[in-house]
Image: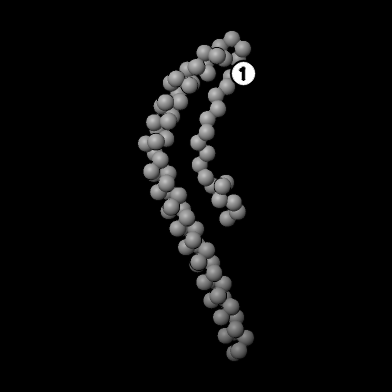
Amino acid sequence: MSDEDEWELQTHLRFSSHRPLLGKLIVFLKRRVLLPVTRWLYEYSLENFRRQQRVNQVLFACLEELAIENARLRQQLERLVDKS
């Protein structure tokens, strides 16, 4: 895998609106209603996110180890085939 930062969950929120008249009201509602609900949901799910990240790391480590073992076994098989 390339960069581990690419796989991290990004949690920052930026509220803006392109509407000139209703924009301030929409941003206000997002900050006062949407942000607290989103924050609660994130905090509620945070442990599951961490647990899933640990599972992913272990799974990728196992896959890497299996790939190395597979390459080693192929080399041994090629040597045995060349000897016979």
**In the displayed structure, would residue 59 be above or below residue 38?**
below
Quarter holding the N terminus?
A: bottom right
Residue 39: give x, y in percent of width and height.
42, 30
The residue depicted at 49 percent of the width and 61 percent of the height is 61
Q: Residue at x 52, y 33 (%)?
A: 12
Q: Is residue 49 above or below residue 83?
A: above
The vertical placement of 25 against 12, above or below, is above
Q: Number of numbered discs present?
A: 1
- Secondary element under disc 1, as helix, strand or loop, is loop
Residue 15 % position (x, y): 55, 24
Q: What residue is at 47 percent from the left and 63 percent from the top?
A: 62
Q: Mark 1 points at which residue?
A: 18
Q: What residue type is labelled 1?
A: His
Q: How is the image coloured?
A: one colour
Q: Residue furthest top?
A: 21
Disc 1: CA contacts within 10 A as few (<14), some (14-19) or many (>=20): few
Q: Position of residue 6 (x, y in %)?
A: 57, 46
Q: In which quarter of the image is the C terminus?
A: bottom right
Compared with residue 72, is residue 38 higher up or lower down, i.e. above or below?
A: above
Residue sitting at 53 percent across and 18 percent down?
Answer: 27
| Residue furthest bottom as drawn | 84
Occupied quadrant, residue 78 = bottom right
Q: Is residue 52 left or right of residue 84?
A: left
Q: Where is residue 21 in the image (x, y as percent from the top left)?
A: 59, 9
